[in-house]
Image: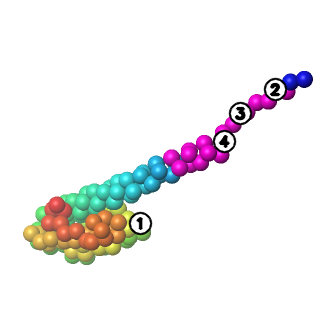
Amino acid sequence: MHKNTSKKGFTLVEIMIVVVIIGLLAAMAIPAFQQVRTNSIGSRMDNDARQIGSAAQQYMLENSQSSLPNIGYTAATGAVTGPITDYVEKIGTGYTTVPTAVTAGATFTMGHPLANGGVAKTYNDEGN
């Protein structure tokens, strides 16, 4: 009697090759993903700076002032407090440096540990 044996399945070598290929793909994808994340945080910070600058300018125009003190920020929630809350209530979370005041014609800084190598960036009074 002839036994009909089936040799279905993968060999150890084939499985190891697949694992190596997946490892190489992951080694290439993870740094690219981290770079995209860093760039997006930097873009978010630029946008938030524009929002703060615009809100401060609007407040200063409506109240005939040349400076805006007492801007508050909660890093965990992104909540903005102070006189500009009518114009901007929330920005991104996790900033280590945010402006506490904005003056017309002056600059302010914002910083996030994952953007610009952790170095705060300087913006003009319009947030650019």
Residue highlighted by disc 1: 77
Let me know if residue 13 is in the magenta part.
Answer: yes
Residue highlighted by disc 2: 4
What type is the residue that disc 1 sits on? Thr
What type is the residue that disc 2 sits on? Asn
Q: Label 3 near label 2: C-beta < 8 Å?
A: no
What type is the residue that disc 3 sits on? Lys
Q: Label 2 near label 1: C-beta < 8 Å?
A: no
- The residues bearing labels 1 and 2 have C-alpha atoms spaced at a distance of 67 Å
Q: Position of residue 20 (x, y in %)?
A: 53, 50
The one of 59 and 13 positioned closer to us in this rendering: 13
**The furthest residue to the top:** 1
Answer with the quarter of the image where residue 7 lies.
top right
Which contiguous range is marked in magenta? 3-21
Answer with the quarter of the image where residue 103 lies.
bottom left
Considering the numbered disc 1 on the image, is that residue within a helix, a strand or a loop?
A: loop
The one of 18 and 85 positioned closer to us in this rendering: 18
Looking at the image, is mark 1 or mark 2 nearer the viewer?
A: 2
The dot on residue 8 is 3
Residue highlighted by disc 4: 11
Q: In this rendering, does residue 101 appear at all? A: yes
